[in-house]
Amino acid sequence: MLPLCMCLEEVNDLPSEQFIKIFGNVVEHTPAAAICILKKRPFHNVEAICDAIDAYLDSLSEHESKNIVQLHPDLAGKLADTGKLSFESTYEQTSMGLLSLSSENKHKLTLLNEEYKARFGFPFVVCIRDTNGINEIIRAIQHRLNNEIDEEINTVIDEVKKISRLRILAMVKE
């Protein structure tokens, strides 16, 4: 749903079903987030929408947070290889060159993704549009592999917040 650009008044006036459809992937494959923030309307500015998503994510238990993270795809992984990423993830990964990596970088990223999932039990998530490309992403995975599980859950939810914020900013203008 990313290419849509609506004004705040349009967002506030959307029928509930339409709102959920449009905002249902602001947090990857999580229409529950859209349902939750729907109750916060009317929004007075775009920042209020972002804050509502942040509050939703902050309200989750550790188990629920892990479930949210599980819904994110591996970077340049099997879903990307088979064209099964969400529209938003395809846009994000394409814009950072992750769907056209060299075989060497693809192999490195695949191995690090596997190591990360083995350590934490969920895929590595980073706001890739907040990075300078594959080398920074590889360094981030290597660095975060040293985190304890609690620290990593907090880090990954912060990354989900950044992703969600950029998705909202792409969809809604003041």
Image: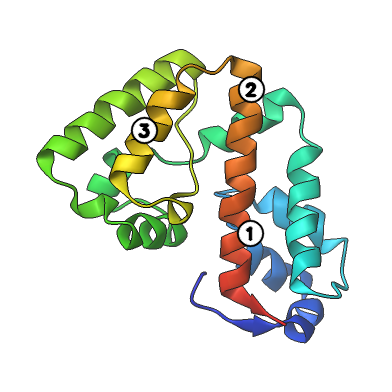
- Number of numbered callouts drawn: 3
Of residue 134 and residue 35, the one placed in the foreground of this image is 134
Question: Which badge, 1 or 3, comes first in the chain's sequence?
Answer: 3
Residue shown at the point (42%, 33%) measured from the top left: 140
Front residue of 149/7: it is 149
Identify the residue under disc 3.
139
The amino acid marked with disc number 3 is: Arg
Q: Which mark is residue 165?
A: 1
Relative vertical location of residue 78 with respect to residue 91 in this rendering, above or below: above
Dot 3 alpha-carbon crowd within 10 angstroms: few under 14, some 14 to 19, many 20 or more: few
Please indicate, yes or no, whether residue 110 appears anywhere in the rendered image: yes
Amino acid bearing label 1: Arg
In this view, 125 is above or below 172: above
Given this view, does label 2 or label 1 mark the residue nearer the observer?
A: 2
Residue at (19, 53) in percent of width and height: 100
N-terminal of the pair, mark 3 or mark 2, is 3
Could you tell me how far apart the alpha carbons at marks 1 and 3 are, in whole angstroms? 23 Å
Which marked residue is nearer to the observer: mark 3 or mark 2? 3
The residue at the far left in this view is 103
- SS class of the residue under badge 2? helix
Please identify the quarter of the rendering in which residue 155 is found. Answer: top right
User: Mark 1 or mark 3, which is nearer to you?
Assistant: 3
- The image shows residue 93 at horizontal and vertical percentages of 35, 54
Counting from the top left corner in percent of width and height, residue 116 is at 41, 22
Q: Which residue is mark 2?
A: 151
Name which residue type carries label 2: Glu
